[in-house]
Amino acid sequence: QVQLVESGGGLVQAGGSLRLSCAASGRTFNSYTMGWFRQAPGKEREFVACIGSNGLTRSYADSVKGRFTISRDNAKNTMYLQMNNLKPEDTAVYYCAADYDGRAWSRSSDYAYWGQGTQATVSS
């Protein structure tokens, strides 16, 4: 089992940047595929980005391609989401998720482990 804790959210103006972190407990972090999802008020949770256990495979939602970068540091048991050129429509609670390689990719329902979320708010 793994526990996930997100941090790095906040309030930023449109065009600004935020860097989210997801710290994981446990000794098997390098066995997990990791993902970022977000949920805006009144909307369903949606896929943002995911990364394979070795960091070599990544995928992004079309809405964030070219603006967001997902990465991980297996030595630190931490995953990141660098968010640049933020837009008001990026406002949401951002969640990190984990599951063993091969079990999950871009569908939220495939992930077994979730963090509590961190709020990112982009003002216009």
Image (cartoon, rainbow, N blue to C red):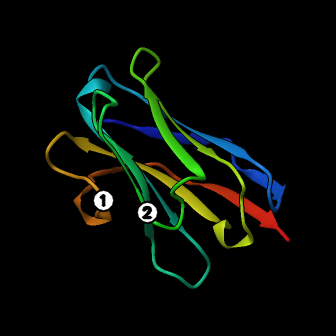
Q: Quadrant of the N terminus?
A: top left
Residue 42: mark = none
The residue shown at (81%, 56%) is 11
Query: In the rendered structure, which disc, 1 or 2, sits on the residue that comes first in sequence?
Result: 2
In this rendering, the answer to whether 7 lies above or below 30 is: below
Give the number of the mark in front: 1 or 2.
2
Q: Which residue is mark 2?
A: 61
The residue shown at (60%, 62%) is 93
Left or right, 5 with reference to 8: left
Identity of the amino acid at label 1?
Ser
> Of helix, strand and loop, which one carries label 2?
loop
The number of callouts visible is 2
Q: CA gap, disc 1 to disc 2? A: 9 Å
Identity of the amino acid at label 2?
Ala
Q: Position of residue 118 (x, y in %)?
A: 62, 53
Dot 1 and dot 2 residues touching (CB under 8 Å):
yes
Residue 106: mark = 1
